[in-house]
Image (spheres, rainbow, N blue to C red):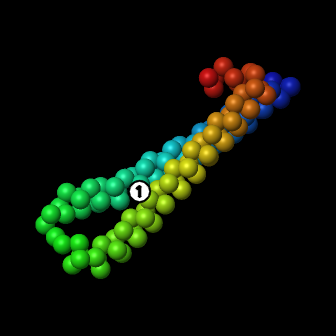
Amino acid sequence: METDGLPKLDSVIFGEIQVLLAEKRTALASLRTGIAVFALPLSVLSALIATSRYYSMEKVMPLLLPLMLLNLGLVVLGCWLVFRSIRRIHHYEARIKELSEKYRSIAQFIE
């Protein structure tokens, strides 16, 4: 066992990087969810447009208005998830880069 404490410090830094990478994976999953939530209203609207010749707008307006409000909510939620995930991914990347610059002994494993 080394007496200068370097192997222990490296293992602590590797542990911190593993936690950051796990958080990055979580942010990527959130990004994927945001994209799916954002795509749902677009597919609903395209189905409504494709079938628009089979119904009259005046007759379906009481149903169409709440659907459009729900779609708007889903678009806002999807955009928020995507932008939040991208911001968090950039934060984790910057933190990992900062750790690799500070501790050059582990930089070869990160790149």
* Residue 41 left/right relative to 82: left
**Is 72 drawn above or below residue 43 in the view shown?**
below
**Is 70 drawn above or below residue 18 in the view shown?**
below
Q: Position of residue 51 (x, y in %)?
A: 17, 61
Q: Quadrant of residue 7?
A: top right
Of the pair 80 and 92, the residue shown nearer to us: 80
Q: Position of residue 39 (x, y in %)?
A: 37, 53
Report the amino acid beneath label 1.
Val
**Is 110 drawn above or below residue 28 in the view shown?**
above
Of the pair 67 and 13, the residue shown nearer to us: 67
Q: Position of residue 98 (x, y in %)?
A: 74, 32
Q: Which residue is mark 1?
A: 37
Q: Give the class, few, some or many, for how many residues have Cα within 10 Å of label 1's Cα (few <14, many ≥20).
A: many
Measuring 45% from the left and 66% from the top, which residue is drawn there?
73
Observer able to see residue 96: yes
* Residue 94 left/right relative to 32: right
Of the pair 61 and 97, the residue shown nearer to us: 61
